[in-house]
Image: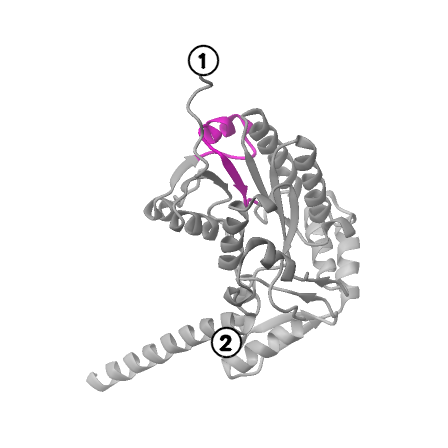
Amino acid sequence: MSGGTPVRSTSILVVGATGTLGRQVVRRALDEGYDVRCLVRSRPAPADFLRDWGATVFNGDLNKPETLPGALVGIHTVIDCATGRPEEPIRRVDWDGKVALISCAKAMGIQRFVFFSIHNCEKHPEVPLMEIKRCTEKYIVDSGMNFTIIRLCGFMQGLIGQYAVPVLEDKSVWGTDAPTRIAYMDTQDVARLTLTALRSDKSERKVMTFAGPRAWTTQEVISLCERLAGQNAKVTTVPVGVLKFTRMLTRLFQWTADVSDRLAFSEVLTGDDVFSAPMTEMYSMLGADPKETTTLELYLQEYYSQILRKLKDLKAQSKQGDFYI
C-alpha cells in the first residue's frame, strides 16, 4: 500500500514569523512560490499582514508543546527564526521551546530543519544565550534530521533604533570603548541567501555563517550616522568595566538573573571579538552574487534619505498651512 500523500517540498513552516528576520523569510519564500505556514503566538495585535501577503497563520506556542504537531502536518521544511521576547527568561523559548519543536519535528518526519544561531557561539560558554545556541546546534545534529544551521553576526535593522534615530533626533546614543567589530547584514539578504541555501544540496547537514561585506566598530557606525544625518551625535560612552560590574551585581539577586544573562551577551559585544567571516566560498557554493548583498553604507543612506525627504515634505506642508492662516 502507499505510504500516503507525499509532502510537497515547497511546504514550509516559519517559526518566529512576526520577528525582524522571520517576516523577511516569509516574504521571500512567498515571492519564490513556496507554500508558507507561520506558527504565531496568540496576541492582542493579530498577524494580519502575514495573511495579506498570502501565508497561512497557525496559532501555536513553543512553550506549549501540545500545539506543535498540528502546525507540522503536511510540512516539508521548518525554518526556525524564533527567539524569546526581552521580558521572557532566555531558557523558556530558546532552549525548552526549541527542544520541544525539534523533537516534534523529528517525530513527524520533517525532512529539513533550518536553524539560525550566533557566530562564535561555541567560544562563549559563559554567556547563557550563546551557550544555549551551541547546545541547540548539537541537539539538532544529534537528532539525525537533515539540517542547515546558519550562524549570524548582526542585523542592520537593529542599528536604526540604536543609532540612526537617536542621532537624527539629537538624543544620546550609547557606545563603549571596546574595539568589537560586527559584519552586519540586512535581514532581506539573510532571507534571500537562506532560500538559496534551501534549494542547494550542498548546504545539507552544514553549519554556515552569513556575514555582511564589512565588519564595523560602534564608533564607525556612529560616525556614518553622523555623516548621513548631517549632525553630530551625543555619545555617552560606557566603559566595559561598568558592564562587568553591573552583571556581577545583578547575579546576586534571583529576580535580576535574566537581566544578568542579557548583560553577559552585551559584554561579548563590547570585547575585542570580530563577528565576521569570509563569504567568498559561501557565495561560490550557493551560486550567489556577492554584489547583491547590501552594504551598511547603502542601507543607512537609503534610510536617511527617506526620513529626511519625509521631514522636508512635512516642513513644506507646515509652511503652506501658515500661508493660509
From the image, tell me which residue sits under label 2.
168
Closest to the observer: 172 or 271?
A: 271
- Left-right relation of 223 to 74: right
Is disc 1 surrounded by few (<14), some (14 to 19) or many (20+) residues within 10 Å? few
As helix, strand or loop, the secondary structure at mark 2 comes to helix
Is disc 2 surrounded by few (<14), some (14 to 19) or many (20+) residues within 10 Å? some
Taking 219 as reference, is 42 above or below it? above
The first of marks 1 and 2 along the sequence is: 1
Percent x, y for residue 165?
51, 70
Q: Which corner quadrant holds the C terminus?
A: bottom left
As helix, strand or loop, the secondary structure at mark 1 comes to loop
Percent x, y for residue 297?
54, 74
Percent x, y for residue 269?
70, 61
Amino acid tagged 1: Met
User: Hey, which quadrant is residue 263 in on the image?
Assistant: bottom right
User: Hey, which quadrant is residue 145 in on the image?
Assistant: top right
Frontmost of labels 1 and 2 is 1
Q: Which corner quadrant holds the N terminus?
A: top left
- Residue in the picture at 73% in, 43% down: 254
Q: In the rendered structure, does residue 31 fall within the stretch colored magenta? A: no
- Residue in the picture at 76% in, 49% down: 122
Q: Magenta residues, as a range?
A: 59-82
